[in-house]
Image (cartoon, helix red, strand yellow):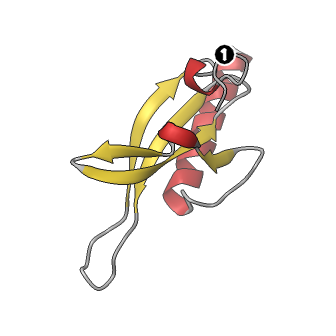
Amino acid sequence: MAGKRGAKNALTDAYDYLTAHPTRYDPARCYQLRGDLSTILVDGVALPQWQYKVTDGARLWYAVDESDAKAKKPGRVYITKAATGHPNETDSKKNFR
């Protein structure tokens, strides 16, 4: 049961991080993906794609659409992938990015 509680706390931490400062670089936990994964199309718009390490294996990939105060447009975070294990696409032993 402790493992489930730990994962729940880790997801709460991820939510707090992504809603407060989704583009804050943290080399141990959060960074923009590289290469062809660095951007993703969301509703026809290319947005930067980031990875958040939820646990040692679990990852969230997300795209960030920054806010624009002049246009009164709120910022948004789009979850593009949720994985319980390390995504193969970013495994340096399998892909040379």
Residue 9, percent across and down?
65, 36
Query: Which residue is outermost to the front?
Result: 96
Residue 44, percent across and down?
22, 49
Residue 13, percent across and down?
63, 45
To which residue does mark 1 refer? Answer: 94
* Helix, strand or loop status at disc 1: loop
For residue 67, side relative to residue 13 (left or right) = left
- Quarter of the image with the N terminus is top right
For image coordinates 46% across by 43% down, the residue present is 62
In the depicted structure, whether residue 58 falls above or below residue 52: above
In the depicted structure, whether residue 67 falls above or below residue 3: below
For image coordinates 62% across by 25% down, the residue present is 58
Tag 1: amino acid = Lys
Quarter holding residue 75? bottom left
- Quarter of the image with the C terminus is top right
Quarter holding residue 22? bottom right
For image coordinates 66% across by 47% down, the residue present is 30
For image coordinates 27% across by 72% down, the residue present is 73
For residue 89, side relative to residue 44 (left or right) = right
Residue 19, percent across and down?
49, 56
- How many discs mark residues in the rendered view? 1
Query: Which residue is outermost to the bottom?
Result: 70
Quarter holding residue 29? top right
Q: Nearer the viewer, residue 6 or 59?
A: 59
Label 1 CA crowd tier, 10 Å (few <14, some 14–19, many 20+)? few
For residue 87, side relative to residue 71 (left or right) = right
Q: Nearer the viewer, residue 72 or 64?
A: 64
